[in-house]
Structure formats: C-alpha cells, structure tokens
Image (cartoon, rainbow, N blue to C red):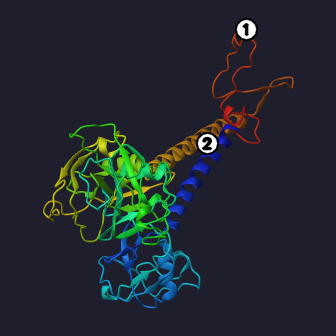
Amino acid sequence: MALTGVIILCSALLILVCLDHALAIASTSVRLADGPSQYVGRVEIYHSGSYGTVCDDDIDTNMAIMFCNMMGFNGGSVRGNTYGSGTGMIWVDNIYCPTGADDINDCSFTWGSHNCQHSEDVSVECAPNNPYYPNEINGLRLVDGSGTVLPWGTLDGYLQIQWVEDWGTVCDDSFSYSEAEFFCRALGFDRGTVGWSSSNSYITGTIWLDDVSCPTDAKSFSQCTHGGWGIHNCAHSEDVYLSCATDSYGQSYVPEPKALAMVSDGNDIYGPPHILLSGSYGWICDDGNFDDEVAKVICEKDFGYNDGQKYIYEGSLIPAMGIMTLNQVHCEGGESSLSDCNYNILNLNASSELSYNDCPAKALIKCTSALLNNATIIIIVVICVIILAAITIVVACSCYHCNKTNKTGPATQPGGASTLTVTQQTAVRPPMGAYNGQQPMTSPGICFARKCSSSPLLQ
C-alpha cells in the first residue's frame, strides 16, 4: 500500500505541474502602446517572454473588438498604423477569428509567422464607456475649496486625481470608509475617513470619478471599481473631502514609498511597478542593483502574488521619466515590503523631470500567482524521479534474491523426506523470547506470484 501511495502522490504532483503551466499558457496578455490615452494605441501581445506586434493583414472590426475586450474594454475599431511602428517580434499575421471570439486563443494563426514590416503594425481604438481602470494614475493630491494645492503633510482636503494630463475630483456617491482608507494610504498616510469642509466655495473643473468602490485590503487602484472616467451624475458640491491621519507627527514626517500594482488581465502581471511617494508617482530605476530579490519582495509582500522576478524586456529601454524615482534599491529577501529595503530617492519634489542620464530605464518585474514556481517544479520532479528509481532498484534486487532462492528448490534426503537448501545465507533462529511475543521481520523479497516473503512496502 505504501508503494501505491507514493506512486499516486508523484502522479498527482506531476499532473498539478502540467495543469499549472497549462493555465499560465491559457492567459495571453495584450496591451496598447504609444497612444495618447489608455484606450488607444498600437496592439502588442505577450508571447514567449516578450511583447510583439500584430500585422494589419486581414484585421477587421471583429478582431479589434476582441483585442479591446481582452483588455477589459467594451468594443473597439481598427485605426490602421495610426500609432506608429513597434520593435521586436511581429507575433501575429494572417489571423482568422470566428465571429464572437473572446480571446486570441480562439483564433487560427501561427505565432511569429508573417510576411510584414513594422510599418504594418495595427492600432485600435477601444470604447472607454465601461468600468475600465487604467494601470496608471499620474498623481494624487489634496486641494482646498478654491482648488489651491495644499502643502505636503496636510491631512485634510478635497481629493484630486490626475488621469492622462488633467486633474479632477471624485464624487462622493458610494464613497465610504474603505475608499477613504485606500486613498489616504495611497497619499502616504496611515489611515483616513471621509471628512467635511467648512468652506462654502467649491472646486471647478473636471469630475473624473463616480461610484468608486475599493475592497478593504486594496493595494492598487486597479482593485477598485467605478463608473468610468469622466462619467458621473454629480455636482462639485459632492466632491470627496478626505481626513487622513498618520502615526508620525511633526514637520519631519516623510512617508515611505509604496509600490502600487499594475493591472492584471490574467494570473500574471508584467511591467514597471508604480511607486507613490508624497503624492507623486514614479518608478524604480534599473541601474544594475535591481534584481530578483527586489522583484520578489514587491510581488510577494506588496502585491500578494506567489512569486516574482526581474523581467527582461527584449525591446528598447523604457526611460524612467518623472519627478520621483528610486535607485540603488537593494532587498535581502526577508523584508515585509519595499519600504523596508534600502533605496535612494532621486529628484524628490523637483520641478523638472529626471533626465535619461539619471535613470536610462524603468525596472520591470513579472509577478505570478502560479501554484508552483519553476524552482519548486524542478525539485518535485527530481524527488519523484529519485523515489521511483529507488523503488525500482529495491524491486529488482529483491526479485533477483527471490529467483535464486526458488531456483535452488527442495533437496531430497534418503527416505524420501524433503528439505530446503538455503544458498544465500544460513538462518540462525534466535533464542526463545527474543521476539517478546511479536512475529519476526519478514525478508525484504518482493516477487509477485512467488513464494517469497513480502516486503513491508506492499503491506
């Protein structure tokens, strides 16, 4: 029974490994590049470790709708080569998709087979009229009733969000404790609640969000829902007013950087982690210090994924432009969050952006929610192979012993009496009482359908 159990366990683990990889393959990441907004751009698809483009041959509206739906939009249309040529692989050409296809895996084509140039890379425009949440908020801040930006460290004020290039407010419909907690934490404070202003004046300009809802443990804005950017039924008298709090007091209070997750369209996420500090968004610089240990801390501790690693982008470098960037980041691996690692802050609160020379590329990470990472898979396979090999050796040796014993056969003594000749070794019976009332251990022989003692492995 023990042997059967070991075989079943190894088989189950191997099936789990295959299922885990099959689920990862089933999820295909699509993104839009070089467009003026979150919902317009050149289509790029992730395959075999890198993003590549789609040739515009045979691309029609139905396929544009499919690509947009894969990214969480509600429909779309083809825009030719409007948003330029990509670099690297051209992954898709001569694609055929059945009507109503929801995923590129439902279509017929061959990865990497094409007769196109990058000048034929297809662009699409997706419909932004659904609760789609962009993977990037450009900034958060608090302002007073006249719209004046409050100095950093002010705990109370109207919440403003910068999306694309414009700042706007948030309507208080459905906005409660959990949403206030999230945005106060995102601003760098420890907690917060919905407050109220004694001012009789109201902000003017854009109202970006309405019906915002965030889970109590939200680590990223991508985990919140809302009615769509710019879609609302509110007046500025309903703008959200936050009252935040911190466990640190005094003018010396400086919040720690927070890593905010990217949007995931499947089990895994790829890309640059967003860093929020003092209400400004920035990046981590890939300056040679950034490695898998940093990526693991961000993915596992800040984002809640099972594993993480530094992601190598095969295309051109992605500059880390912005007013705040971390460099010289170093993690040992046991930290509880990115803020516990060693780092240096570049150009904090500066009015000008970082130059290319300051930080030539953003650090990129890959976070995975797979049940088993590659190292674990290798260990499991090796252990199973060793166990099965050991069992095979034991069975072979035992059967060899059994065969030799049975071949000896009974010897006939004078008078017709039979006796068994033992050729391997002489069995010596221990004195009475040596077993203390228990049966002696059986021989390790394992020979099916033979009269040889059974192994405990089969009992």
Is residue 377 something one can see in this rendering?
no
Label 2 CA crowd tier, 10 Å (few <14, some 14–19, many 20+): some
Q: What element carries label 1?
A: loop
Using the image, determine if residue 306 lies above or below residue 38. above
- Image quadrant where one finds the N terminus: top right
Say if 357 sits above or below 378 in the image. Answer: below
Residue at the front extreme?
A: 200
Q: Where is residue 272 in the image (x, y as percent from the top left)?
A: 32, 61
Q: Residue 247 occupies which quadrant of the picture? A: top left
Q: Position of residue 437 (x, y in %)?
A: 76, 13
Which disc is residue 433 wearing?
Answer: 1
Q: Which of the two discs, 2 and 1, labels the residue nearer the N terminus?
A: 2
Residues at discs 2 and 1 in contact (Cβ within 8 Å): no
Could you give the CA–CA distance between mark 2 and mark 1, rounded to whole angstroms? 34 Å
Q: Mark 2 points at which residue?
A: 396
Residue sitting at x 39%, y 57%: 261
